[in-house]
Image (cartoon, helix red, strand yellow):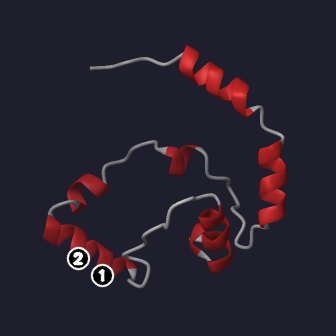
Amino acid sequence: MASQTIHAIAVTDAAADLPVMRPLIGMDKSQIIEIARNIGTYETSIIPFDDCCTVFVPRHPLTKPRLEKILAEEARLDKSGLMERAFATLKHIM
């Protein structure tokens, strides 16, 4: 996947203050599927669901994103306004 290139991983890590653990990074798909079957999570993992990976991923993701471009775009965001809007429309579901 494009998001799993060395360049993309480095840009992703730059956004995190804590270390990002990637216990499966050295495994191929068949190994990961086998582990999921062994621990009982495979059937759940294949249920179709619109999460952020499917909703927000660009059609053609970059394989070599540039951190300075990402930071420039993030700087243009109205973070305070976005947070205010998020909290104003927050719904508590029990």
Quote the CA–CA distance across marks 1 and 2. 5 Å
Residue 33 sits in quarter: bottom left
Looking at this view, is 35 or 46 the one in front?
A: 35
Q: Is 64 situated left or right of 29 in this image?
A: right
The local secondary structure at tag 2 comes to: helix
Work out whether 22 lies above or below 41.
below
Counting every numbered tag in the picture gives 2
Work out whether 52 lies above or below 82.
below
Q: Is 75 situated left or right of 62 in this image?
A: right
Q: Quadrant of the N terminus?
A: bottom right
The local secondary structure at tag 1 comes to: helix
CB of mark 1 within 8 Å of CB of mark 2?
Answer: yes
At a point 43% along the width and 17% down the height, the residue shown is 91
Q: Position of residue 63 (x, y in %)?
A: 70, 72
**Residue that label 1 marks:** 31
Q: Amino acid at mark 2?
A: Glu
Looking at this view, is 69 or 47 the one in front?
A: 69
Residue 10 sits in quarter: bottom right
Q: Position of residue 21 (x, y in %)?
A: 42, 70
**Residue that label 2 marks:** 34
Work out whether 16 lies above or below 30.
above
At a point 77% along the width and 31% down the height, the residue shown is 78
Q: Quadrant of the C terminus?
A: top left
Q: Residue furthest front?
A: 17
Q: Within 10 Å of the Cα at label 1, are there few (<14), some (14-19), or many (20+) other Cα atoms?
A: few
Q: Residue furthest top?
A: 88
Q: Within 10 Å of the Cα at label 2, are there few (<14), some (14-19), or many (20+) other Cα atoms?
A: few
Q: Amino acid at mark 1?
A: Gln
Q: Position of residue 19 (x, y in %)?
A: 49, 67
Q: Position of residue 42 (x, y in %)?
A: 23, 62
